[in-house]
Structure formats: structure tokens, C-alpha cells
Image (cartoon, rainbow, N blue to C red):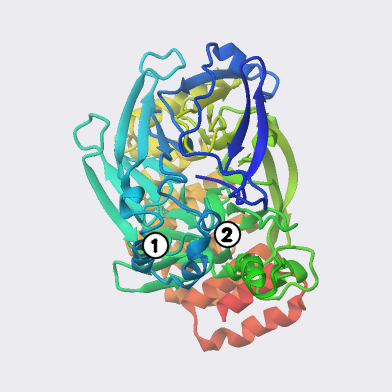
């Protein structure tokens, strides 16, 4: 689920169809929850008889067509969606919100205890301690679910509906808040686990499930500060986030990852191994997405104390400054002084504010402010949308009557990024997530409105007929349906030039299964190729170097660090650092003096992975030359140290 934090009453009217006062926990203010709480079984919403009436309240780009792809009972309480290679839609549904998944504002009796928790086992013990308030059976009555729906007859509407997986009703289970279908597996984010599920017999019901990692969500904290996912990176790793319900993890290889009061961005291999924290100090980061140049961003929600929701450039080793103690401050000052104070350093020093001169240097600024209640996030894959939306991210702003899907574009700002433009893409829905189908359509989940769990929901599609008619758009669906493993090397090499980044990425991964395809990647990096093709060549070499221990590919990455295009140099040195090729240290060190700040930052981080104390003078020279002007560059130097 992708909520904001404090409850409020919104008036959300569907013209001529719905007229009700809707209470939503997702987009909330600092109101007293006990006053406006609502019930666990709200009155049913009016029946919607006509798709046309639903669509009439939605604003979307001129020239596009909107369709109701599915309504209840094909979708209920949707928090996140994902689309598999056959264009089936997987829906993460919450059925335990406020009836098994709790919030400290509705449970003042345990708030002090909750701030002391250090593990999921301790959280369970806390539930048992207060069993007189809520018996353990209360936490197991309802289950989170994954539903799969499909349009099997091609009429643009779902006609197949199955529960792919359920039974997520352990007392410790959180909100079903992230789902990703990938190559026959379904990854599911549901505190305290990241799950990997599989349907092995083709009946669209998971018969295998494995917890890739347990230990997320050591505290109850606030509604929606959950485990969210997912994004597949060009390094063939899976990226995801958690809010400040925090984590205490013992990894498969015996490492201990722990934070009591912070959220973070993680990455792991597809099988769950190699789990690591990438970026820490986040409050409530929601979904995560890559652009076509290999940069990855998330959206982090605000404290509702006058701070702003933030777009965050996810950088290795970065710290964004949040600590749940800031949220506790009003609670504890009320206990001590009898009044709620909000003047924490988060606000006084502007830890959240990219323009604050008081913000400590250890805290890396965000890339910009956008939305009031960020939720799902996706990036334009390159087919299906008009040129206007080229190189745009799309974020669901989940704020009651003001909800919208906002398109925004990032542009370089020194070693970091800033928001170059933003504009509503779709509005008039209580949108929780957006994904782009392999059929060229944008799919958006609509929570509809009643709180906390009401059994309603919609999935809408939006498409541009002109874009759908293009051969390259039509080709995408067939490629994914048939699979890339069946394609020969020549075809895969050609697809590295495809306008759809998903096609390029899967072609890259298919080629990287065989080290003999190194030459294909080298050819793709030639300056005459499109920049995106060159980058997939870089990442393909990185796949071989890191996953196949191919030294020849690592050497080629080192050579690409002198490429003419800074974007190639930057990704080459980043990938070189990931490869662990120690002989690449001289090349990485040389790029500390590159003309491009982003490349310098990525080089500094690579130096930290490949080098030793001999590189300290070069890093210090970078710090001195920067003269504290570019904090992303400063962070890179510190990380390299």
C-alpha cells in the first residue's frame, strides 16, 4: 500500500455515480484518528452501473482513450499492480488494513513499547502483552491477497479472475504493498517478508512460495510505512524499499542488516542472495524506478508538519536524514509537557529541505519536491505514449479528491538531478499504482475511496490509438509473450536498438547468459550506436563481469571509461566498481578528474570498492577542488574513502 500518514475526511464525489463522504487512511493529516476513525466494515458504496459514468469524471490527455479494465469483484482494495509477460495483471490487495495491520495512533497503549522494539519477535511479544486489548485471533482473521486478472478474448476488459496467493494472515504480516511478476516468478512485499512465489502447473495459483528474507517491519509505527517494491535494474538485481517500520535482518550469507528507526532502499539478486542496503535515512519511500540511462529514483513521503514529499535520487551509501524519533517528538513532549511540539531538527534545521543552509552535510539533499502523498512510480518504457511524455516518470499522488498521476522529467544538476517539469497525466482517480503493459497501455489501479477495507476497486487502462498502431509498439507484446530465450543472437543484438527499454533490457539479459556474446556487447558500445544501445552494451558487459566472473568483460569496461559520452563513462565506471575487478582501480581513479560531475561521483564510489588507502590523496583532491559546492560530489568522495 502506498499511503500518507495521518487520517482525515475527504469528500470524493464521482459525478452522477458516487456521492459519499469517504475516509481514507492513505492520504491523511495530523488529525486525531480516534475522532474520525470509521469502522472495519463500512457501508457498501453505491453500485456503478456504467463504465461511461466512471470515465466521465477522469481527466486524461487529449487523444488518449480510457477503458475500465476491471471492477469488483475482479479487483478489491488494490495497493499495487504488476504485469507479467503474457500481459496478465497481478494485484496486491489489502484486506487487513485497520483489522490486523495496525497504527500507533489507534493504539496509544503501546506507543512507548513500540519505540523500543528491535525485532519482529519483540513486536509479536508486544501483541501478546496487550492481548486484553486485541487478542491474537484479531490479527489472523483476514488475509492479504495477490489476485491475477486477464483479458483472454482481447476486448480490452478482464474476463479471468483468480486468487494467485493468500494466507498472509500471520499476526506479524503487514500490508500487501508491492508485487512484481518476472519470468514466471512473482515477488511480493508484505512485512515481515519479501516473498518469491511460483505457479508451476499453469493454473494461475501459486503452489510454491519462499521467503527470500524475513525481518522487515520491527515496529508498528504509522499506517503505510511498509515494504514496497519492486524494480529490475540493468545489473539484473531487484530493488525495493521499506519505510521507517525499519528492519532487523540476518541475510542468507550471515550478515546482519539493522536499523531501528529508518527506512531504506535495498537490492538483491533474483534468488534473494546478496541483499544489501543501498540508501538509508528514508521515511516512507514508496515504489522505485529506473530511467533509461541507469539512474534510479524513489518518492519519499512527508511528515505532515510543513515538510514536503520528496523525489530521491537513490545513491549508494547515501543518507537522507530521517529518524523515527522526529515522529515520536510530539508524542513524548505531550507526555512531558502536556502539549504536542513539532519543532524537531527535521523541521528546525530543514533536514528534508534541499535549500536549507542548516541541513547537516551528512544528509544528501533530495532531487526535488513533488506530490502530497506519493504512491506508485513508473517510467515511460519508450513505446505507447506520445513524444510529449518521453523520458518521464509517473507518480501516483494519493490524496483523496486531489489525487492524480503526475508525469515528471528529471535533468542533471551537477552530480545530482532536479525536476525539470511536471504535469498531471491522469486525475480523478484514487490512484495507488501505475504500470505500463506490454500491449502499449498504461494501467492504473483505483482504490475507489472507502476506508479502511471495503472490497471495491477499479483498474483503468489509458492508451493512445496512434501509438498503439506503430509497428514497434505492436512488436513488444509478441516478444514478451514468446520469450527472449528463444531468439537467436542476431535478433537479440538487433533488439538492443529497440525503442522500448524493456525489450532492450530483456535482450541484454538473454545475451548475458552466454559469455560468447561479449563481442555483441562490445559492438553495441560503439559511438555510432544510439546512446541507449551503448548503455545496454555497458550493462551487458557488467552482467558478464559480475555474474560470470568474466575478466575480459571487466577489461572492456575499463576501456569504456574513456568513451566520448559522459553517460557511457559514468555507467562504465559504476559497473566496473560493481564487478570487483581490482585492476580497474587506476581507471576509476583517473575519472575523479573527469569533466562531468556525475561521472566523478560514480568514479569515487567505484574507487571505494576497488581501491585502498593509496587513493585517499586523489579523493582528498576531489573534495578540495569541489570546495563544498556539489554535495553529491562530496558524498561520492566520502563514499570512496
Residue at numbered disc 2? 314
Query: Residue 117, percent across and down?
Result: 44, 70
Residue 573, picture quadrant: bottom right
Q: Is residue 496 above or below residue 105?
A: above
The residue lying at 42 percent from left, 72 percent from top is 118
Query: Residue 473, percent across and down?
Result: 51, 25
Q: Is residue 593 visible?
A: no
> Which of pointers 1 and 2 indicates the residue nearer the eye?
1
Marks 1 & 2, CB-CB < 8 Å contact: no
Q: Residues within 10 Å of mark 1 (few under 14, many from 20)?
A: few
Which numbered tag is attached to residue 230?
A: none
Residue at numbered disc 1? 130
Residue 488, picture quadrant: top left
384 displayed left or right of 503: right
Q: Is residue 254 visible?
A: yes
Tell me which numbered mark, 1 or 2, is placed earlier along the sequence.
1
Query: Residue 29, percent across and down?
Result: 67, 49
Nearest the eye: 327 or 554: 327
233 displayed left or right of 105: left
Amino acid at each position: 500500500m502506498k499511503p500518507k500518514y495521518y487520517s482525515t475526511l475527504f469528500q470524493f464525489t464521482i459525478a452522477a455515480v458516487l456521492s459519499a463522504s469517504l475516509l481514507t487512511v492513505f492520504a491523511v493529516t495530523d488529525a486525531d484518528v480516534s475522532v474520525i476513525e470509521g469502522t472495519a466494515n463500512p457501508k457498501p458504496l453505491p453500485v456503478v452501473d456504467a463504465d461511461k459514468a466512471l470515465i466521465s469524471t477522469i481527466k486524461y490527455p487529449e487523444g488518449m482513450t480510457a477503458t475500465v479494465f476491471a471492477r469488483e469483484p475482479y479487483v478489491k482494495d488494490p495497493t499495487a499492480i504488476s504485469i507479467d509477460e503474457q500481459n496478465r495483471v497481478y494485484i496486491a490487495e489489502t484486506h487487513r488494513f485497520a483489522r490486523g495491520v495496525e497504527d500507533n495512533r489507534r493504539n496509544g497503549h503501546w506507543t512507548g513499547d513500540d519505540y523500543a522494539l528491535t525485532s519482529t519477535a519483540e513486536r509479536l511479544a508486544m501483541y501478546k502483552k496487550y492481548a486484553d486489548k486485541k487478542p491474537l485471533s484479531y490479527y489472523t482473521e483476514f488475509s492479504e491477497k495477490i489476485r491475477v486478472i486477464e483479458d483472454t478474448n482481447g476486448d480490452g476488459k478482464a474476463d479471468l479472475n483468480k486468487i494467485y496467493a493468500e494466507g498472509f494472515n500471520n499476526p506479524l504480516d503487514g500490508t500487501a504493498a508491492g508485487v512484481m511478476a518476472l519470468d514466471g516468478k512473482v515477488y511480493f512485499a508484505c512485512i515481515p517478508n519479501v516473498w518469491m512465489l511460483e505457479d508451476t502447473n499453469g493454473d494461475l495459483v501459486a503452489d510454491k512460495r519462499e521467503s527470500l528474507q524475513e525481518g522487515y517491519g520491527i515496529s508498528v509505527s504509522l499506517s503505510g510505512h511498509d515494504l514496497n517494491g519492486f524494480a529490475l535494474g540493468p545489473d539484473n538485481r531487484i530493488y525495493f524499499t521499506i519505510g521507517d517500520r525499519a528492519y532487523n535482518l540476518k541475510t542468507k550469507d550471515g550478515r546482519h542488516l539493522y536499523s531501528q528507526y529508518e527506512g531504506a532502499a535495498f537490492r538483491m539478486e533474483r534468488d534473494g542472495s546478496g541483499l544489501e542496503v543501498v540508501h538509508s535515512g528514508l521515511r516512507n519511500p514508496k515504489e522505485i524506478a529506473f530511467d533509461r540511462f541507469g539512474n534510479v529514483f524513489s518518492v519519499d513521503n512527508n511528515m505532515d508538519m510543513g515538510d514536503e514529499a520528496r523525489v530521491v535520487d537513490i545513491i549508494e551509501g547515501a543518507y537522507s536524514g530521517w529518524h523515527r524519533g522526529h515522529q515520536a517528538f510530539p508524542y513524548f513532549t505531550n507526555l512531558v509537557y502536556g502539549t504536542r511540539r513539532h519543532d524537531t531538527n527535521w523541521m528546525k534545521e530543514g533536514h528534508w529541505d534541499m535549500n536549507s543552509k542548516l541541513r547537516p552535510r551528512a544528509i544528501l539533499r533530495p532531487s526535488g519536491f513533488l506530490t502530497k502523498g506519493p504512491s506508485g512510480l513508473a517510467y515511460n518504457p519508450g513505446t505507447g505514449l506520445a513524444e510529449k511524455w518521453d523520458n518521464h516518470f509517473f507518480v501516483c499522488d494519493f490524496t483523496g479528491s486531489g489525487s492524480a498521476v503526475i508525469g515528471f522529467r528529471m535533468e542533471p544538476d551537477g552530480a545530482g538531478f532536479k525536476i525539470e517539469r511536471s504535469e498531471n497525466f491522469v486525475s480523478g482517480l484514487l490512484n495507488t499504482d501505475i504500470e505500463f503493459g506490454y500491449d502499449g497501455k498504461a494501467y492504473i489501479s483505483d482504490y475507489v475511496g472507502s476506508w479502511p477495507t471495503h472490497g471495491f476497486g477499479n483498474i483503468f487502462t489509458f492508451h493512445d490509438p496512434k501509438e498503439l498502431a506503430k509497428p514497434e509498439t505492436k512488436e513488444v507484446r509478441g516478444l514478451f509473450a514468446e520469450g527472449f530465450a528463444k531468439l537467436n543472437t542476431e535478433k537479440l543484438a538487433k533488439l538492443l536498438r529497440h525503442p522500448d527499454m524493456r525489450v532492450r533490457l530483456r535482450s541484454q539479459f538473454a545475451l548475458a547468459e552466454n559469455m560468447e556474446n561479449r563481442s555483441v556487447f562490445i559492438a553495441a558500445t560503439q559511438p555510432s550506436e544510439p546512446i541507449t544501445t551503448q548503455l545496454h552494451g555497458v550493462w551487458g558487459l557488467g552482467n558478464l563481469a559480475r555474474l560470470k566472473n568474466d575478466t575480459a568483460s571487466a577489461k572492456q569496461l575499463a576501456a569504456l571509461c574513456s568513451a566520448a559520452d559522459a553517460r557511457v563513462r559514468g555507467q562504465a565506471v559504476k559497473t566496473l566498481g560493481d564487478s570487483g575487478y581490482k585492476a580497474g582501480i587506476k581507471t576509476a581513479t583517473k575519472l575523479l578528474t573527469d569533466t562531468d560531475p556525475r561521472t566523478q561521483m560514480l568514479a569515487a564510489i567505484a574507487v571505494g570498492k576497488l581501491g585502498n588507502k593509496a587513493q585517499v590523496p586523489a579523493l582528498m583532491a576531489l573534495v578540495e577542488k569541489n570546495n563544498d559546492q556539489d554535495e553529491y560530489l562530496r558524498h561520492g568522495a566520502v563514499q570512496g574513502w
